[in-house]
Amino acid sequence: MYVTCARPKSTTALTSTGEGRLQARRSIRGATALLSLGILACGGSDNAAADSAAGASAAAVSADGAAGAGAGVNVAMISASGQELGTLILSESAGTISVSGALRGLPPGEHGIHLHMVGQCTPPFETAGGHWNPTSRSHGTQNPAGPHAGDMPNISVGADSSVNVTVTSAAGPLRGATGLVDMDGAAVLIHATADDYKTDPSGNSGARIACGAIASGS
């Protein structure tokens, strides 16, 4: 049976005979049934389509929000001589900031690595400011008055000058009112020697030998 969404038209002529009146009543009942089925079919279809569209829209908004909130930040690292060293990825992880990636071209040995307050990497990288320290604590995870939020474990560069970085900051978050990435950005800094985890302001980790700038709004 084919049902359209238009109002059905009666084609039955009422007569004065009993048979005619019976046929008319049957015709009206049939038309009413068809009309009800048509309303249900059309209304159901429209409602289903509207519900489907609303659901898809809500899912898209939810996906966009989730991507924006949880998206990582790629940080291109350079040496003081301008050599490209590789890329690190920063992402939020359980209230801290996870830093990972592969670097090459660094001096072999232990090196301090920290999150800094300003997204500028002009050699010798003093433009990156001090360690990210929103709670005004002292440097070092072994310092009773520490640590800075941007303090992280040392990295160990191999004899081939490469390193796979997997470290986590002392605190987070990456974005937001109290996050690392603010109006003047932020930076990742690698130092010439190991961090002793206790001495202000940077654990006696020496010169800044590599830097990666994070732009505001990243």
Image (cartoon, grey):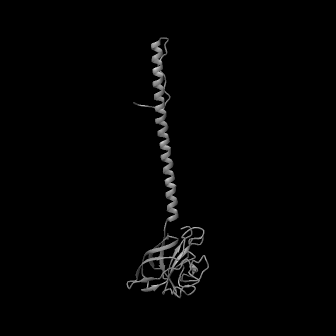
- Location of residue 199 (image quadrant): bottom right
- Location of residue 216 (image quadrant): bottom right
Q: Left of 85 or right of it: where is 65?
A: right
- Location of residue 198 (image quadrant): bottom right
Q: Position of residue 99 (x, y in %)?
A: 47, 74
Q: Position of residue 110 (x, y in %)?
A: 45, 86
Which quarter of the image is occupied by the N terminus?
top left
Front one among 119 and 80: 119
**Residue 8 vertical placement versus 136 (above, below):** above
Front one among 215 and 51: 51
Q: Residue at x 49, y 15 (%)?
A: 14
**Residue 46 vertical placement versus 102 (above, below):** above
> Which residue appears farthest toward the right when viewing the image?
136
Front one among 175 and 87: 175
Front one among 83 and 199: 199
Q: Residue at x 52, y 55 (%)?
A: 61
Q: Residue at x 47, y 43 (%)?
A: 48
